[in-house]
């Protein structure tokens, strides 16, 4: 068995400490990247980079990493890792992914959101494909037994003809709706989207009073990541998607509706309701058992498989670009008075920063 050398860029929460914030026994543990690599015999974490020396030091102490760097470029050139984890904030995801892909790295596990504009997403796809680099975005639900089983059942026709997939939840557009749109696309089988119409909320974050954010047409940039609000998406094949933040309440729920049933999932499966039947009275049926395994470990295993075989990974760059496009086009629709925006998005340089 090959032992794959891993280097991490950004030594913060998702890199090494987010597990401390989660309840013991949570089905997603280990959730942080370092924990995922530590759980696998085929990966070894050899180096870490962060511009913050104290973050670097505590990460390396906790995860037994002996070599640390303040410049991720130097780390990648000197360590020649097989895999790079991109765990900085969103605005550096494209730059680091592109540098790693151009410097011999074979697999990249990049945190969401993928990047800040479609121009960045296009550049990432081009460089990854030109260099034959496997890529997975940290959209964890794609790698849970629950969402994988749901997608399989939906593809097998258990819900009949697919009509509608909906997300309800309160989060920021790039930061959180990247998860929301991703799970909608995954459950529907990743059909291409034809158009999206919607609005975003002109505030960013959950602070009181809220921090207002706005779009500047002169720079084609938002100054902050806006609050997700609502969106309607038309997919090829006839299914519609919808995302809504009607209450501002902290909830994360998906519902898929077909001609023969309805599936409702709360977040990572805290509640699942599956009702079957084509009439008004639908029969509640138990959702089948599914494997409960850390999605982070599953994502890394899927990345390793892609590196070995060249098979497309589950959150590969093209799939992730399509989801990123929904986020950006949602904001574009807002600026155009909630008019439907055809996809692919023409405004490739529209830029939305996020943490
Ligand atoms: N998949 C998930 O569920 C999930 C959960 C949390 C965070 N995230 C994502 O992970 C990313 C990081 O979030 P976080 O909460 O861990 O943030 P964080 O602030 O805790 O960590 C980011 C780290 O990157 C470092 N950094 C900044 N510039 C750098 C540079 N040039 N080189 C090296 N390091 C640099 C910072 O010093 C910091 O230590 C975000 O994109 C976020 O959306 C995903």
Image (spheres, helix red, strand yellow):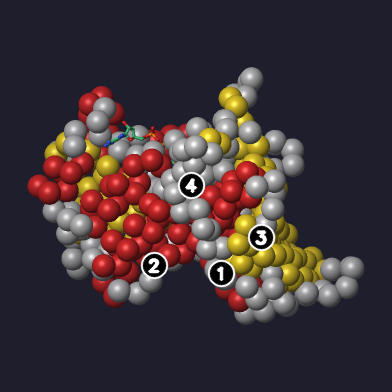
Q: Which residue is mark 4?
A: 350
Mark count: 4
Q: Is residue 65 left or right of residue 161?
A: left
Q: Which mark is nearer the camera, 4 or 1?
A: 4
Q: Is residue 351 left or right of residue 265?
A: left
Separation (CA) of disc 1 from disc 3: 10 Å
In the rendered structure, are the residues bearing label 1 and label 2 in contact, judged by CB atoms less than 8 Å apart? no
Q: Is residue 163 above or below residue 7?
A: below
Residue 233, disc: 3
Please state the horizontal and vertical placement of residue 167, each as a whole percent of the image: 67, 53
Q: Residue furthest top?
A: 209
Q: Which residue is mark 2?
A: 313
Q: Residue at x 65, y 47 (%)?
A: 336
| Image quadrant in which you'd find residue 136 | bottom left
Q: Residue furthest front?
A: 218
Q: Secondary structure at mark 4?
A: loop
């Amino acid at each position: 068995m090959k032992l794959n050398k891993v280097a991490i860029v950004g030594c913060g929460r998702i890199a090494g400490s987010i597990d401390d914030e989660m309840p013991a026994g949570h089905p997603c543990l280990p959730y942080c990247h370092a924990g995922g690599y530590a759980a696998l015999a085929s990966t070894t974490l050899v180096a870490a980079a962060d511009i913050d020396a104290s973050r670097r030091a505590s990460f390396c102490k906790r995860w037994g990493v002996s070599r640390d760097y303040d410049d991720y470029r130097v780390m990648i050139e000197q360590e020649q890792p097989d895999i790079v984890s991109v765990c900085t904030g969103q605005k550096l995801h494209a730059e680091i992914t592109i540098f790693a892909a151009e410097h011999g790295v074979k697999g990249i596990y990049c945190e969401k959101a993928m990047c800040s504009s479609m121009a960045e997403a296009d550049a990432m796809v081009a460089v990854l494909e030109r260099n034959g680099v496997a890529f997975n975005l940290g959209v964890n639900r794609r790698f849970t037994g629950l969402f994988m089983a749901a997608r399989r059942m939906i593809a097998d026709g258990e819900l009949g003809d697919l009509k509608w997939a909906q997300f309800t939840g309160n989060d920021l557009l790039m930061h959180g709706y990247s998860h929301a749109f991703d799970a909608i696309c995954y459950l529907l089988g990743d059909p291409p989207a034809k158009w999206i119409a919607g609005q975003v909320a002109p505030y960013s974050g959950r602070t009181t009073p809220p921090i207002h954010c706005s779009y500047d047409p002169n720079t084609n940039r938002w100054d902050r990541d806006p609050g997700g609000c609502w969106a309607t998406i038309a997919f090829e094949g006839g299914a519609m998607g919808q995302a809504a933040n009607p209450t501002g309440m902290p909830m994360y729920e998906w519902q898929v509706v077909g001609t023969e049933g309805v599936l409702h999932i709360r977040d990572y499966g805290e509640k699942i309701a599956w009702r079957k039947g084509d009439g008004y009275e639908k029969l509640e049926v138990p959702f089948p058992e599914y494997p409960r395994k850390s999605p982070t470990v599953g994502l890394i295993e899927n990345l390793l498989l892609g590196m070995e075989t060249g098979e497309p990974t589950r959150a590969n760059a093209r799939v992730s670009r399509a989801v990123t496009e929904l986020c950006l086009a949602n904001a574009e629709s807002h600026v155009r008075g909630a008019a439907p925006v055809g996809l692919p998005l023409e405004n490739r340089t529209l830029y939305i920063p996020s943490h």
